[in-house]
Image (spheres, helix red, strand yellow):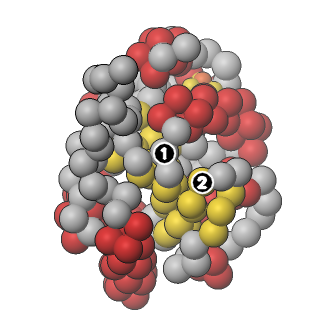
Amino acid sequence: MTLAELNASVRDCQQCRLASKRTQVVVGAGNPAATIMFIGEAPGFHEDKQGEPFVGAAGKLLTELLDSAGLSRNDVYIANVIKCRPPDNRNPLPDEIETCKPFLMQQIQLINPKVICTLGNFAIRTMLGKQVSITKIRGEHFEVQGFDVFPMLHPAAALHQGNFRVLLQEDFRKLKKYLDNTHLMQPKTAEQMGLFG
Ligand code: SF4
């Protein structure tokens, strides 16, 4: 299956109760060959209307943070744990996460990034399969199933709490340092792009 085929198959999904209230499914956006993938929580009001992840105020902050790390939205792929907006932006429920999780896992498999940055509690809990607290493990960097995972605070939380914004900026500085040291964001060669051989 390709990413485009996966996107098409998710767009009409009716597998959980969130299908009845959404305007549209928000599958993901960005570079399908990205080295870095960001995973947020769920679409909000603006995302539900526009069909793209992180397009509201939190999205603007994410774009600024990416810029601070020398990245653009075209360099990365952005998705959420949950693909449809929970009513009134409530937290996703455990059964909704379980039902939607296979789509995220397929996205990760197809994009096959080197680095996964999780944003907020739900994304890192989904990646680890356990109830961790983002405020306790943010700033760390560890390997999960072969991916380098950077758990970060969610930009929406940073909009409301000034100290979270400082911590999130710190996390992106760490990410930049890691990318600079590992040269992960250097342009791919023609061979790596599959243009030869
Ligand atoms: S949240 Fe996920 S599982 Fe539920 S309807 Fe939307 S795409 Fe399907």
Q: Is the C-beta separation of discs 2 and 1 under 8 Å?
A: yes
Mark 2 or mark 1: whose residue is earlier in sequence: 1
Residue 148: name its quadrant.
Answer: bottom right
Residue bearing mark 1: 113
Residue 83 point in image, percent of width and height: 51, 33
Is 59 on the left-hand or right-hand side of 164?
Answer: left
Q: Which residue is painted at 38% across and 74% down in the image?
A: 181
Looking at mark 1, is its residue's CB closer than 8 Å to ligand 1?
no
Residue 171: name its quadrant.
Answer: bottom left
Q: Quadrant of the C terminus?
A: top left
Q: Which residue is painted at 48% across and 35% down in the image?
A: 111
Give how far apart the Cα atoms at labels 2 and 1 are: 7 Å
Looking at mark 2, is its residue's CB closer than 8 Å to ligand 1?
no
Q: Which residue is painted at 40% across and 78% down in the image?
A: 174
Residue 154 point in image, percent of width and height: 46, 64
Amino acid identity at mark 1: Pro
- Return the residue nearer the eye: 127 or 32: 32
Amino acid identity at mark 2: Phe
Residue 28: name its quadrant.
Answer: top left
Q: Residue furthest front?
A: 197
Q: Report the disc number at residue 147.
A: 2
Is 128 on the left-hand or right-hand side of 123?
Answer: right
Residue 18 visible in the snapshot: no
Where's ligand 1: which quadrant?
top right
Q: Which residue is painted at 34% across and 63% down in the image?
A: 183
Q: Residues within 10 Å of mark 1 (few under 14, many from 20)?
A: many
For residue 88, above or below residue 58: above
- Return the residue nearer the eye: 5 or 22: 5
Residue 137 point in image, percent of width and height: 63, 77
